[in-house]
Amino acid sequence: MDEAKPSVVLQEVSHVYVSGKTAFLALERIGFTLQAGEFVSLVGPSGCGKTTLLSIVAGLIAPTAGRVEVGGKAVTGPSRQIGYMLQHDYLFPWRTILDNSLIGLELHGNITEGQRSEALGLLAEMGLGDVAGQYPHQLSGGMRQRVALVRTLVTSPDILLLDEPFSALDYQTKLQLEQLIADTLRKWGKSALLVTHDISEAIAMSDRIIVMDRRPGRLRRDIRIPEEIRAASPMKAREMPGFHRLFGEIWNEFEDMEARREPL
Ligand code: ADP
Ligand code: MG
């Protein structure tokens, strides 16, 4: 753990969506800490508030109640400390891959030659060196997600928020990208909060898994992943005996939530 890097602290975070005359309690008293360098996954049924929670941490939504701190300072809006990667890559079709990966930097001012070559270096590291001058439609889904990752990393955030970044990919591409992200984050000591509906992915990638409940969105379990699984690559982790036990444990949490779900 790198002491110079910030941790994220959530204290009693609640959020109510108001539309017209109705109010909907999306999150209720969420509290946890993401330590510097830690990888935490958020899993839970659809609609339990995972995206809302990420948007609050990103400073895009102000919570109705409670507080989020990054490095001891209250979050009051978006900042360069935090990179947010969405499920869909949202690349601009008329911009080259290099120009797409520079968008985040452009929002912060003019781009220097140094930043340009840094982006090119990152693209090369992600296996995209040869396509830097091409356009998004020329790339596969997995490649486009890697461009989105470069675009997120190029602004040098300490914390990455990843909202189902692998869900539109085929299985093999997803495993490769999991590996790439795990290696990259570990190398640079970055923290991550990953939203996923894939229990295997959560176990294979994380230091901890937070299971959320819905109506209202609450914390249900905070599960620490055993050291031997954490030390293994996302691919190898899936073959370990402890993996299947954990999978069963989390699966049961989902079954319990499903069993007492009221009809919609
Ligand atoms: P998840 O990402 O876990 O599927 P979300 O955070 O997207 O959940 O949504 C949590 C709940 O809040 C859902 O019931 C959703 O319908 C509701 N919700 C999300 N965004 C809004 C909004 N802008 N206005 C009203 N309700 C919303
Ligand atoms: Mg969501």
Image: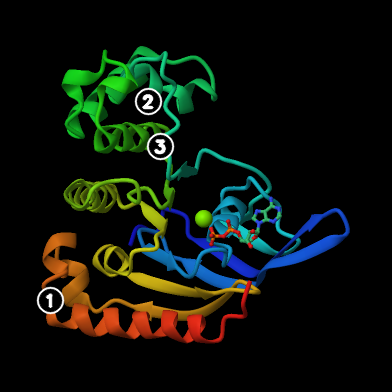
Q: According to the image, label 3 marks what residue?
A: 152
Q: Residues within 10 Å of mark 1 (few under 14, many from 20)?
A: some
Ranked by sequence position, the earlier of labels 2 and 3 is 2
Residue 247: % across, % down: 28, 78
Q: Residue at x 25, y 18 (%)?
A: 132
Q: Nearer the viewer, mark 2 or mark 1?
A: 1
Amino acid beneath label 1? Met
Which element is circle 2 on? helix
Amino acid beneath label 2? Ser
> Does 85 sit left or right of 206 as displayed?
right
The CA distance from mark 3 to mark 1 is 32 Å
Residue 100: % across, % down: 39, 22
Ranked by sequence position, the earlier of labels 2 and 1 is 2
Contact between labelled residues 3 and 2, with CB atoms less than 8 Å apart = no
Residue 204 visible in this rendered orientation of the protein: yes
Q: Is residue 43 above or below residue 68?
A: below
- Give residue 168's mark: none
Query: Residue 235's quadrant in the figure?
Result: bottom left
The CA distance from mark 2 to mark 3 is 8 Å
Residue 219: % across, % down: 54, 77
